[in-house]
Image: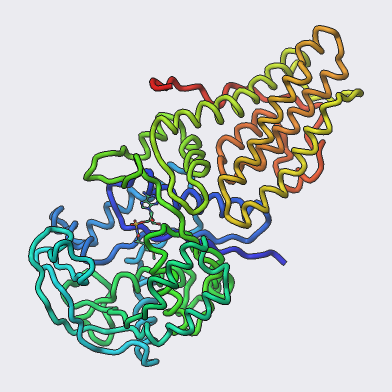
Amino acid sequence: MEKKYYITTPIYYPSANFHIGHCYTTVVADSIARFKKQEGYDVYFLTGSDEHGLKIQKKAIESGVTPQEYVDKVIENAKDLWKCLDISYDKFIRTTDEEHVRAVQKIFKKLYDKGDIYKGEYKGLYCTPCESFWTETQLVDGKCPDCGREVNLVREEAYFFKLSKYQDRLLEYIETHPEFIQPVSRKNEMINNFIKPGLEDLCVSRTSFDWGIPVTFDEKHVVYVWLDALSNYISALGYLSSDDTLFKKYWPADLHIVGKEIVRFHTIIWPAILMALDLPLPHQVFGHGWLVINGGKISKSLGNYEDPREYIKAYGVDAIRYYLLREVPFGSDGNFSLDLLITRYNTDLANTVGNLVNRTLSMLTKYFDGEIKKGEETTSFDNDLIDLVINTHDKVVEAMDKLEVPEALDYIFEIFRRCNKYIDETMPWVLAKEGKTELLKTVLYNLLEAIRIGAILLKPYLPRTANEILRQLNTKNEDISSITTFGNLELGIHINDFKPIFMRVDNKNE
Ligand code: MSP
């Protein structure tokens, strides 16, 4: 039976100003999804946009359009960015989609009927110019953290979700399922900073603005954006709709991959809602670190970034994917700078891979007219190369099981580095000069086969590069099943036209 794998990114606030940090969650999720597909899983990869709430309503007012017009316009920006980054999602959900709206309304009603949502009064600190509620601890010098003005104590009729009721079950679940919150540091933070000090019931409706999903039985209320947004993970699969085939097939999610600042919503509020709905919890929530610039935030107001599409235009999409996947260590923050991007590009992509492929294909053209042949003799360096290549798949699988994406990628690059060393060891130009044709055939075959296997393993991470390498090799054996043994590169075929895949870029600071 095919194994299923349901993976999600957070749904993004629609924006006209995405930065490179925003690309991180989605590129990582895309690679994991592609990897699982390659491993034979039946994968469903969900992403989308989070379109309700006061913030969006305000932006729409500023732009002089309705909230719906605003989100319809900026949504194209997100879709275009994902297209430019080769994101292979199966569904893009919008929280303004009819089906999502209906599902959220049903979820709200279900929880209300069950007694887990009740009507009460919200008491909080309110900033009128910003139309925002704050807690005491969020204030900066007793003032609104957004605009610095005075806040007032206000009361508003609101519905509450009985989060406190689920505190003990949640704690027990987290403690008995160590894989649920990853990395471990985030799990400890959730337990010690949020759950153990005590969970308060959560305000899940608002009456002070109307850009949200109306509560069906009390229409002056709109559903709190996080209840609305989190529900996307099940509404996208048709939960509580007339066709819940996908839901039955894919839920519970195998992985919610989210940035560290929203782990709290995904590991406290979301599981409590699922418990209230009597649904199984996702297998894992992985909270990744942030991409930072000079140790600090990437932000529009600091003006420290460009649209990621500018980098894609300059260096190609795989340079950006590679940087994001390789540079940010497992679960922690990673730095972004153009310098580092160019250095990684030149050393790993242009030199280690690009140059290797180009050199090898040039030698095959020069010595054998581009025909792939097998030699009758072997060199003393072959076994070491072959062993490393054949064992790489297992190492990649092991790293990916732990979501150690940079490590997985590094194992694959080890193949290309080993190939370069093999060229130095065997010196094919000397073999050619000395007329050792059989050895020369062997060396070039081993290199090309190692490159083919490396390219297949590279597909989930750098799909374009991998496919271009395989195209240049003119091989039909592109499947993961063809890399369990060494020697599946077809003999007698002629390589396709080829050119360098990556051109070195001048780095002014290098
Ligand atoms: N709409 C909510 C998520 C709701 S999910 C039910 C949201 N949206 S967001 O647009 O602000 O963020 C989307 C993702 O981008 C989050 O995972 C967030 O962590 C990630 N990133 C935003 N800036 C980032 C960096 N500088 N670095 C890495 N990831 C960052 O939160």
Left or right side of 101 for 238: right
Task: Tell me what residue is drawn at x 32 percent, y 81 percent.
Answer: 200
- Does the image show residue 459? yes
Q: Is residue 481 above or below residue 495?
A: below
- Does the image show residue 241? no
Task: Tell me what residue is drawn at x 79 percent, y 46 percent.
Answer: 484
Position of the N terminus, as image quadrant, is bottom right
Nearest to the observer: residue 462 or residue 218: 462
Q: Quadrant of residue 58?
A: bottom left
Left or right side of 463 for 444: right
| Residue 137 locus on image (x, y percent) | 23, 68
Nearest to the observer: residue 493 or residue 380: 380
Task: Tell me what residue is drawn at x 67 percent, y 41 percent.
Answer: 456
| Residue 396 locus on image (x, y percent) | 66, 48
Q: Quadrant of ligand 1?
A: bottom left
Q: Quadrant of residue 141?
A: bottom left
Q: Quadrant of residue 193?
A: bottom left
Q: Is residue 151 above or below residue 216?
A: above
Q: Is residue 132 above or below residue 417?
A: below
